[in-house]
C-alpha cells in the first residue's frame, strides 16, 4: 500500500464537501458516531436529511458562517492506497489556504459545477496548482445530474479548460464527469454517462503514479540536528531532500565549502548502504568539519546555488501587508537567515494572470520579487527541486509565518513591471506617453491575427536566424503581417555604436526591445533573433510587452554542433584568438529557465521547428486555427 | 506483563512515509526548542511516539523527558507498562498528578456518578508546563480522531495562557515548521497528525512495538452506562439500577478509567485487532464518555489547552 496526497478546491457550492463526504462515505471512512454527530448537526441546522457535506465541516465559527476557512486534512484508504486530502476552501480571499494545501499535494482536484462552467476560481485553482508544481490535475465536472448527464456540456467545459491549462505548467490534466451527490463516476462507473469511457475518480486516484515528482538526481541533505552519543561518534541527522548517496562518496559541506567523504550512514534498523530521497538518516563524515543545523551536505560535483539574492515567486499570507525593507526571517530547509524584499517585479492578478506593478504585497497577493539575505542560502529552482526551492518568511515581531516563496534562481535585477525604465527614458522625464492613435486591437482585428513578439535566444550558430526566416516565410504565406529583427542587421544601423561588453549588450537589447514593442503595437508578429545571453536583458524585453504577447523561444543546440556548423566562421576566429567575449566560450550564456517554447535544433529539422511554432501560436490564439481541408475533393 | 512482540516485517510504503514524517518532526522539535517534553499517556499512540523518538535520535538517546499527567484513575496494567518502558529506554519520566492539583486547590473535583478527571488534566498539564518551563510538548493526537482536529497544525502555537486560537493559526507549508515564539508561550507538536487509527495499529504490528495487554481481548467486569462500557474500579460509583457484569472486552484507548469505554471483542492478536478496526463503525473517541457531552465539546476543550 502506498500513499497519495491530494488537494481539493472548488468555488463555494460546487459540491466539494459533498464529494469528499462521498469518497469518505463510500470508502467507509466515516464512522458511526461521526455519522450520528452529522445527523444531529443536520437536524440542528434545519435541513432534515443527512448532509454528506457536513463530514468535512470543522470549527464552530466556520459553521456559523456556513463556510470553511482553513485547510482541513481528511484521511481515507482503499486496499490499494492511503489518501491524505488537503481540503481547501475556494473562496476569493483564501488563496493563502489553497497555496498551503497545494504545497504538500501531488495531485489537485479542481471542481467545476457543470451548470456554471469554467469560472474565474476554477482558473485560479489551476494556476496555483501549477505555481506549486503539482504534477497531476483532475478537473471533476460535478452536478452532471443537473445537466441531464449531457456529453456536450462536459465537452464544452473540457475544451475551455484545456485551452487555459496549456498556459500552465501542469504535466497531466484529466477530466472526469461526476455527480458527487448521486455518486456517478466517483467510486462506481455511471450508467448515466455511457459516452464517458475514462476511469472513475477513485480509480484514477488509486492508479495515478505517486511519488513521481521527487528529484532523484541532485543529492541534498540539509542538516537538522547533530547527534553525539559519545566522543567517538558525531552524526548529522536529517532527511534526504533529494537524490541519494552511498558511503565512501566525496561530498561538499556548506557553508564551509570543504570536501570530505561519507563515512557511514546510520539508522535505527541498521547501517545503510544507501540513503534515498525522503529517508531520515544519520550521516557520519570522514573529517571533523564545521557543520551544524542549517548546513547542507551535497555532492562535490552537483551543488545547489549558493547565493544571497534570489528571484522568487512569493505568496503573501498575512493580514499585515509586506513592509518594504523590513527584515524578515527566511526559513529555507533547516536554515534560518534574515532577509528583506529588495524589489517587487510584479504582482499577478491570479484571475487573469496579468502582471501589474505593486509597491507591496497584501494578504493573498502572489507575484514575483527579489529577496536579499544576510547569509548565503543553498537553493535550487523550485521547478527542479520542490524541497530546496521552497521557503517561508516569518515576521520576527509577531513570529507569524507571513509568506511562502518559490525560488526561480539567483536574482537578475529585473526591472519592475510598469516602472520608468533606465537609460534613455529616464533621461527625458518630461515626455508624456500619450497612447497610440489607433489601438493595437483594431489593427489586430483588421489583420485577422494577434500581435506578438517572438524572441529567439540561443548560441551563435544554433539556428535562430534560419528558423526565424523560414518561419516568417510561412507566416507571410498565411497573410500575416510580420517583421524580422535580426541582431546583425541592427548592429549595422541603430546599434552601430555598441560593442560586446555586458553594458553594451544590455543597451543593444534595450533598443531592440523598444523597436520590437513598436512593431508589436503596430500589429505585427515580430520575430527577434538575438543571442541575448543575459536573462535580465530578456526579462526586460518581456516586461515591455503586455501579457500574453511575449514568447521567449530558446533555440537549444549543443555547443559542439554550433561549433561544427559555424555558419559565419566565428568559432574559428575565436579559436584563432581574434574575438574576445564570445558567448558560450569566453562569455557566459544564461539559458532561459522558463521559456514559452524550446526548440532543439540539433535534433529537429527546420521544418519541424517551424511547425512547432505555428502550432503554438495557433494554440495561443495568436494565429487563427488552420484551414481544414474541404471535404469532397 | 508485556505482550509478546510479533516478528518484524518490512514496513509498507505508506507507513514508511508516515514514520519518516514523524521522525523529521521529532528532530525539528529537538533542534528548535530548548526544553521539550513528550506527553506520555501510556496509550498506544504515545508508545508509538516513544518508538519514533528512539529512531529519530539513534544512536543517541532521546534528548527529552517523558511527562505523564496522572489522573490517578489509571489502569494498573498501563502503569506497569509505563515503568518498564522507561527503565528499558533509560529516559527520564516526570509525573504530575491531578490529585496534587486538587489538593492544592488549583482544581475542583467533579461530582456525581459521571465525574471525570479528564477536564482537570488541563490544569495539571498547564501548571506542569509552566513549572518545568517547557517550550514544546509533543503529543500523540491525530487529525482523524475528531472533526475539530482536522485543521490542527503539526506545530500548534499556544499563547502564554496555554490557549489555542483557531482563528490565529500559522499556515504550515511543505515540511517547514515555524516554532518561533515569545517567552512564556509554548507549542504542542503532533508528529502523528497524518496517521489514522488503522495506521497506528499496522505500525505497531509491522514494527513489533509492544503495547499493554488491556488492548487485547480479555474477560473483565464492566458496567454499561449509557452505552459506554466502563471497567470496574474504585473510582466508579454505581447508580441504583446498575451492576457489574463479566464481558469479553478490550480497550481501544487507555485513559482515565472513569470515562474510557471498552468494546466487546474477542480480538486477541494484532492481526485480529486490525481486522476489527477495518470493520469498525465507531471511532476511537466514540468510546470516551466525555466526548459525547456536546457537539463542540472537543473544540471547547482544545481552546482551553487540552492535549
Ligand atoms: N444535484 C447535485 N447537487 C450537488 C452535487 N454535488 C453537490 N451538490 C449540492 O450542491 C450544494 C453545495 O454542495 P457542497 O458540497 O456544500 O459545496 P462546497 O461549497 O463546494 O463544499 C449542496 O446542496 C449539495 O447537495 C451533485 O453532483 N449533484
Image (cartoon, grey):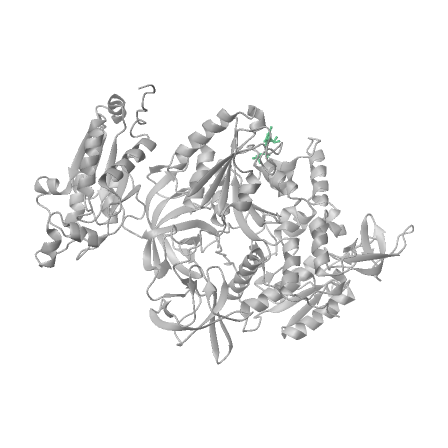
Name the one closer to the observer, B104 or B17.
B17
Give the total of numbered labels.
Answer: 0
As drawn, which residue projects farthest toward the right?
B240
Q: Give the image location of residue A570, x and y in percent.
A: 11, 51
Indicate the quadrant containing the C terminus of chain A: top left, top right, bottom left or bottom right. Answer: top left
Name the one closer to the observer, A566 or A222.
A566
Q: Give the image location of residue A241, x and y in percent.
A: 44, 59
As drawn, which residue projects farthest toward the front?
A633
Q: Give the image location of residue B18, x and y in percent.
A: 56, 57
Left or right, B135 with respect to A472, comes to right
Left or right, A414 with respect to A8, comes to left
Q: Can residue A321 be spotted in the picture?
A: yes
Name the one closer to the observer, B175 or A460.
A460
In which of the image's four quarters is ligand 1 placed? top right
Q: Residue at x 75, y 70 (%)?
A: B1
Q: Can residue A57 be spotted in the picture?
A: no
Q: Give the image location of residue A260, x and y in percent.
A: 37, 73
As drawn, which residue projects farthest toward the top?
A632
Please, is residue A385 above or below residue A442 in the view?
A: below
Please, is residue A415 above or below residue B185 in the view?
A: above
Amino acid at each position: 500500500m502506498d500513499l497519495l496526497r491530494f488537494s481539493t478546491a472548488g468555488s463555494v457550492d460546487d459540491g466539494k464537501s459533498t464529494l469528499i463526504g462521498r469518497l469518505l462515505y463510500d470508502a467507509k471512512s466515516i464512522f458511526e458516531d461521526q455519522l450520528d454527530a452529522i445527523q444531529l448537526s443536520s437536524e440542528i441546522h434545519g435541513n432534515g436529511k443527512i448532509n454528506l457535506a457536513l463530514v468535512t465541516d470543522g470549527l464552530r465559527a466556520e459553521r456559523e458562517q456556513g463556510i470553511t476557512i482553513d485547510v482541513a486534512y481528511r484521511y481515507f484508504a482503499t486496499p490499494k492506497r492511503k489518501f491524505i486530502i488537503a481540503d481547501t476552501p475556494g473562496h476569493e480571499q483564501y488563496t493563502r489556504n489553497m497555496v498551503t494545501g497545494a504545497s504538500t499535494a501531488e495531485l489537485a482536484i479542481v471542481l467545476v459545477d457543470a451548470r456554471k462552467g469554467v469560472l474565474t476560481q476554477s482558473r485560479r485553482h489551476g494556476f496555483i496548482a501549477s505555481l506549486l508544481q503539482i504534477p497531476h490535475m483532475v478537473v471533476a465536472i460535478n452536478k452532471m445530474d443537473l445537466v441531464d448527464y449531457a456529453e456536450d456540456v462536459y465537452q464544452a467545459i473540457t475544451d475551455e479548460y484545456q485551452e487555459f491549462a496549456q498556459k500552465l505548467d501542469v504535466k497531466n490534466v484529466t477530466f472526469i464527469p461526476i455527480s458527487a451527490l448521486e455518486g456517478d463516476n466517483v467510486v462506481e462507473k455511471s450508467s448515466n454517462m455511457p459516452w464517458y469511457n475514462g476511469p472513475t475518480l477513485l480509480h484514477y486516484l488509486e492508479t495515478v503514479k505517486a511519488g513521481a515528482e521527487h528529484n532523484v538526481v541532485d543529492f541534498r541533505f540539509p542538516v537538522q540536528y547533530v547527534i553525539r552519543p559519545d566522543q567517538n561518534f558525531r552524526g548529522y541527522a536529517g532527511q534526504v531532500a533529494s537524490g541519494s548517496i552511498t558511503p565512501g562518496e566525496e561530498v561538499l559541506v556548506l557553508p564551509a565549502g570543504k570536501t570530505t567523504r561519507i563515512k557511514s550512514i546510520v539508522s535505527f534498523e541498521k547501517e545503510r548502504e544507501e540513503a534515498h530521497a525522503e529517508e531520515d538518516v544519520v550521516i557520519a563524515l570522514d573529517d571533523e568539519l564545521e557543520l551544524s543545523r542549517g548546513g547542507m551536505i551535497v555532492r562535490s560535483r552537483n551543488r545547489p546555488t549558493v547565493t544571497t539574492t534570489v528571484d522568487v515567486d512569493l505568496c503573501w499570507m498575512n493580514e499585515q501587508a509586506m513592509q518594504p525593507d523590513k527584515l524578515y526571517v527566511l526559513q529555507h530547509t533547516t536554515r534560518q537567515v534574515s532577509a528583506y524584499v529588495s524589489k517587487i517585479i510584479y504582482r499577478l492578478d491570479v484571475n487573469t494572470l496579468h502582471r501589474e506593478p505593486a509597491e507591496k504585497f497584501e494578504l493573498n497577493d502572489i507575484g514575483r520579487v527579489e529577496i536579499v539575505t544576510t547569509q548565503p542560502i543553498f537553493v535550487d529552482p523550485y521547478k527542479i527541486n520542490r524541497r530546496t526551492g521552497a521557503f517561508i518568511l516569518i515576521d520576527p515581531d509577531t513570529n507569524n509565518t507571513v509568506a511562502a516563496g518559490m525560488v526561480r534562481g539567483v536574482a537578475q535585477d529585473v526591472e519592475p513591471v510598469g516602472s520608468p525604465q533606465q537609460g534613455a527614458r529616464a533621461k527625458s522625464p518630461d515626455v508624456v506617453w500619450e497612447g497610440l492613435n489607433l489601438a493595437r486591437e483594431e489593427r489586430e482585428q483588421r489583420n485577422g491575427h494577434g500581435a506578438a513578439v517572438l524572441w529567439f535566444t540561443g548560441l551563435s550558430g544554433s539556428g535562430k536566424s534560419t528558423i526565424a526566416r523560414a518561419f516568417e516565410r510561412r507566416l507571410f504565406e498565411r497573410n500575416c503581417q510580420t517583421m524580422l529583427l535580426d541582431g546583425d542587421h541592427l548592429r549595422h544601423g541603430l546599434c552601430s555604436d555598441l560593442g560586446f561588453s555586458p553594458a553594451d549588450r544590455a543597451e543593444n537589447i534595450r533598443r531592440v526591445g523598444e523597436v520590437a514593442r513598436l512593431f508589436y503595437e503596430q500589429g505585427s508578429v515580430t520575430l527577434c533573433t538575438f543571442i541575448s545571453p543575459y536573462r535580465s536583458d530578456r526579462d526586460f524585453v518581456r516586461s515591455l510587452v503586455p501579457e500574453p504577447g511575449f514568447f521567449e523561444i530558446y533555440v537549444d543546440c549543443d555547443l559542439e554542433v554550433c561549433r561544427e556548423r559555424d555558419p559565419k566562421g566565428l568559432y574559428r576566429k575565436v579559436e584563432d584568438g581574434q574575438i574576445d567575449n564570445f558567448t558560450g566560450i569566453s562569455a557566459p550564456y544564461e539559458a532561459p529557465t522558463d521559456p514559452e517554447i524550446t526548440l532543439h535544433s540539433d535534433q529537429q529539422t527546420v521544418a519541424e521547428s517551424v511547425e512547432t511554432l505555428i502550432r503554438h501560436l495557433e494554440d495561443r490564439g495568436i494565429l487563427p486555427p488552420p484551414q481544414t481541408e474541404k471535404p469532397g475533393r | 506483563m508485556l505482550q509478546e512482540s510479533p516478528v518484524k516485517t518490512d514496513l509498507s510504503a505508506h507507513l514508511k512515509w508516515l514514520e519518516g514524517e514523524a521522525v523529521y518532526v521529532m528532530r525539528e522539535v529537538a533542534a528548535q526548542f530548548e526544553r521539550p517534553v513528550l506527553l506520555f499517556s501510556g496509550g498506544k499512540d504515545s508508545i508509538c511516539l516513544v518508538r519514533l523518538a528512539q529512531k529519530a535520535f539513534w544512536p543517541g538517546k532521546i534528548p527529552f523527558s517523558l511527562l505523564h499527567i496522572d489522573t490517578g484513575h489509571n489502569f494498573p496494567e498501563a502503569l506497569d507498562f509505563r515503568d518498564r518502558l522507561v527503565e528499558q529506554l533509560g529516559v527520564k519520566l516526570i509525573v504530575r498528578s491531578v490529585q496534587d492539583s486538587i489538593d492544592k486547590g488549583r482544581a475542583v473535583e467533579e461530582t456525581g456518578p459521571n465525574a471525570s478527571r479528564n477536564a482537570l488534566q488541563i490544569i495539571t498539564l498547564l501548571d506542569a508546563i509552566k513549572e518545568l518551563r517547557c517550550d514544546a510538548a509533543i503529543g500523540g493526537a491525530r487529525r482523524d480522531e475528531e472533526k475539530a482536529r482536522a485543521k490542527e497544525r503539526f506545530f500548534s502555537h499556544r499563547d502564554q495562557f496555554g490557549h489555542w486560537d483557531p482563528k490565529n493559526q500559522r499556515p504550515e507549508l511543505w515540511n517547514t515548521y515555524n516554532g518561533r515564539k515569545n517567552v512564556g508561550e509554548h507549542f504542542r507538536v503532533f508528529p502523528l497528525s497524518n496517521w489514522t487509527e488503522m495506521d497506528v495499529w499496522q505500525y505497531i504490528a509491522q514494527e513489533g512495538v509492544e503495547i499493554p495487554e488491556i488492548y487485547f481481548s480479555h474477560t473483565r467486569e464492566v458496567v454499561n452506562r449509557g452505552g459506554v462500557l466502563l471497567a470496574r474500579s474504585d473510582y466508579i460509583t454505581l447508580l441504583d439500577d446498575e451492576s457489574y457484569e463479566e464481558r469479553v472486552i478490550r480497550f481501544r484507548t487507555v485513559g482515565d478509567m472513569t470515562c474510557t469505554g471498552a468494546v466487546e471483542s474477542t480480538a486477541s492478536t494484532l492481526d485480529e485487532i486490525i481486522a476489527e478496526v477495518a470493520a469498525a463503525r465507531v471511532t476511537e473517541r466514540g468510546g470516551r464518555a466525555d466526548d459525547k457531552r456536546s457537539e463542540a465539546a472537543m473544540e471547547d476543550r482544545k481552546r482551553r489547552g487540552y492535549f
